[in-house]
Image: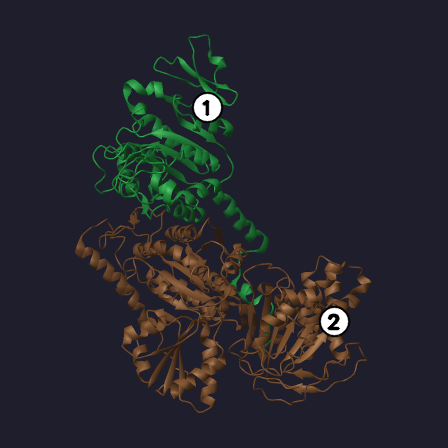
Amino acid sequence: MALPGGSAGQEEGARPRAPEAPQQPQRKPVIQRSQVVVRFAGDSGDGMQLAGMQLTAESALAGNDLATLPDFPAEIRAPAGTLAGVSGFQLNFSSNEVFTPGDEPNVLVAMNPAALKANIDDLSTGAIVIVDKEAFTESNLKRAGYESNPLTDHSLDRFQVFEVEVGRLTTLALRELGLGNREVQRCRNMFVLGLVSWLYHRPLEPTLSWLNRRFEKSAELREANLRAVRAGYNFGEATEIFASSYQVPPARIEPGVYRNITGNSAVALGLVAAAVSAGRPLFLGSYPITPASDILHDLAAYKNFGVYTFQAEDEIAGVNAAIGAAFGGAIGVTTTSGPGMDLKAEAVGLAVKVELPLVIVDVQRAGPSTGMPTKPEQADLLMALYGRHGEAPLPVLAAATPADCFECAYEAVRLAVKYMTPVIVLSDSNLANGAEPWRLPELERLAPIKVEFRTDPEGYQPYLRDEQTLGRPWVIPGTPGLEHRIGGLSSEHLTGNVSYSPTNNELMVRIRARKIAGIARELAPTTVFGDPEGGDLVILAWGSTFGAVREAVKQARAAGRKVSHVHLRYLNPLPADLGAVLRRFAKVMVAELNLGQLLKLVRAEYLIDAFGCNKVQGRPFKVSELVARIERALK
Amino acid sequence: MAGTLTRKDFVSNQEVRWCPGCGDYAILAQVQKVLPEFGVAREKVVFISGIGCSSRFPYYMNTYGFHTIHGRAPAIATGLKVTRPDLEVWVVTGDGDGLSIGGNHLVHALRRNIGLKILLFNNRIYGLTKGQYSPTSEVGKVTKSTPMGSVDFPFNPIAVALGAHASFVCRAVDVEQKHLGEMLRRAHEHRGGAFIEIFQNCNIFNDGAFHELTDKPLKADYQLILEHGKPLIFGRNRDKGVRLNGHKPEIVTLANGASEKDLLVHDETDPALGFILANFAPPMPTPIGVFYVDSRPPFEAEMNRQLERAKEQRGVGDLRKLLYGGDTWTVS
């Protein structure tokens, strides 16, 4: 069978759709592949996320490198069978290094006509399409907006379509268990997982042990799900539909201990690790918002680490409570997405002014306003940098991958307490829900985070600064002899007393700006992927576009192009050498999921005639789009 | 150290900058007078305020203090009190700060029963922005922003606090020093969140808003001092009482055949009675004192108990186990 995606492997002609009656098990030919992209799609109640996550766990055990991307609607349970209710999960697994969840699926599992319709345009010619034939009823077709049945009207002729009676086969497999039809139908996801697992030689062990754990308390449901997975697997082997199966050999992966991690979980772990390192309690003030809520959920489970999670009455209370906790000596954190950032701006400005440590995590989503809450975008950059009244600079970090969210969260806490400043961490819905294997850090190698509260009254002044960092001393209530007042009003240098002196105000504004700019001193020199000494084109990017840009640059370089990639973690302050590095290249292209925000900054900061590569569709860049853009830029 | 503190220990070196004659001076003086009597170490006391005239308060207290942003003091104080239950945290707010821009935070702090002592200075006007009507101004109030009179129906702060199920609700008057001191003491002794509405005169923009309650010849006829377990009696000759007719209060004259045993007896633990008292309107007298108290546990105690329980059940968090403990695999 022809699989798209440029990966090498034997090819075989398309086969006609075959009858689905199970046959005797037989050995079938095995075809080698280097990379496969699978997408599961169904109603949001069909369990597609679970099927995808389990195929991910199986692929990790198989030793492949991988990346995933869930894609679900904002509506929790949109009307069944409609396009609005389609939920998807995409997994890219490979024997090579993986940077993205993949541009175009090689395999689409569609549980109903709506799932087919919503996803079919993303597939390239020759892709495998596995559909639940029974779901293609007249009413479901109508609900999905199909005028004729795509399974019979030849509109799918350019794909390999496998029609499977998923419902009937699952029912047959479970008939001895005496379950109701509803419970049986809820096992359909495990049947298709089993089938895909067979097709790609995935080990079932992680799924079987997960099912054993998940249904520990219900022997019936456990048995039903286990049977459904095995039935799907055996069906693949037994039926004539599938003439062959595929193998994706393990990737060469750096030695270490790995686990799968989503960006949101990595943020939570990074914050806990930082608080443990600092020896302080962690306080999260947060209000539920998509796609950031999972950070709150994760942290709520870490109470034995001294983690306080406060679900506030609103976004404003969330950040303010975190500031109050920081005043008392805790690591104060608030987590949110764009709309919440709008609401928190005033409080963040207060933290800038009173110089208390605070971490703000913005899991960006497509805007403006409510926008597309589950879809990614990078359009909060300028807000993070400048979205406060007055001169209110603060450090801004952006995570590049799900695992990098750990590093960025940890680093944000380190900077916040060292420089006594709020720090913004930018993630996005891609990173938040996307997963990748994470090589676990050696704890001894994490940068130590030192918190020392001043207790000595001798010579104390609230704004007497550290000469090196310009940070002011952190003195917490309860310390005898150091009683003092802080506040939002302009305050006098050193004493912190309210002051309306014009020159003092400018002095304080400039000191705070210098403090933040000074962080650049401790940033590592900019690393260039490609030609560090310069070349025809450099792509400057930040955040979750890392994988797509890196893969595109690799492909362009393989085709002989002198293209390089610089990826920024620190958006403020920018690395001190960035301007000099960019000037080594004939052309500078800034790729970002907005209309040119970093671009504006780079042009203003360095007077470089950079140009943009921009997209605001609530979708990540495709590698192919970037490769085409590189070609255009080099013409 | 705590035992030897005096008023002076709580006076900061900052010049007080309220308008001469402002009711805030009286409140500040009383707070500075009674705090040393509570026996709390000065470094354990924190004053947190929002924005407005009243919110300058922390600058004048020689304790820890935080002058924050408009309306958010209860939220900031919540984060502090939850993580630092060892501190005595006072919030100073006003009718605009606490009931308009910060209304949301106030009601949620009260319903959660965060152990904050919230002083709401109610002068029924915006002073710092120079005289616009506030959410407690009476209907018809003529101000710069309401030249034809306000059409807003006002909040009744006590009723708002009771509606939010605050666990301690009382009212005081700026110049009734002894009574105010007593209310501060009750708030200090209350284990959960305490809400104190303080009628405060703005002599610049709303002078005399509470003059019936403060003018010597009038106040005995207009003030009803609430005392737990005692009948509701008022009047310069203490000859007027309040009794209930169904759920409706009415004034009776003791000389005219009514006796003390017919009168309503105040019960601080009765929330229904608290509401009835909160809604007293002319010709009924204005109650001051404690409307309602309950002893449900404060939020911060419960939350810290959960943290302790988690440590007992799962052991103090081990970072290595947390990171390496899940579904991992090893590549060699």
Where residue A221 appears, as percent x and y from the top left, is 73, 60
Numbered mark located on residue B307 in the image = none
Q: In this view, does A472 lie to the left or right of A169?
A: left
Q: Relative to B263, is A125 above or below?
A: below
- Answer few, some or many: residues within 10 Å of disc 2's Cα (few below 14, many 20 plus, some between 14 and 19): some
Residue at image position (41%, 60%) is A360
Residue at image position (51%, 23%) is B247
In the figure, the brown chain has which letter? A
Numbered mark located on residue A165 in the image = 2
Q: Is residue B28 left or right of residue A130?
A: left
Q: How far apart are marks 2 and 1 (CA)?
A: 75 Å
Mark 2 or 1: in front is: 2
> Three-letter amino acid code at disc 2?
Glu
Residue at image position (40%, 72%) is A569
Local secondary structure at mark 1: loop
Numbered mark located on residue B228 in the image = 1
Q: Relative to A285, is A73 above or below?
A: below
Residue at the far bottom: name it: A560
Q: Are marks 2 and 1 in contact (CB under 8 Å)?
A: no
Q: Quadrant of residue A260?
A: bottom right
Residue at the far front: name it: A147
Where residue A37 appears, as percent x and y from the top left, is 59, 78
> Three-letter amino acid code at disc 1?
His
Task: Name the chain letter of the residue that bears numbered label 2.
Answer: A
Local secondary structure at mark 2: loop
Tell me, yes or no, if residue A41 can be seen here: no
Tell me, yes or no, if residue A520 can be seen here: yes
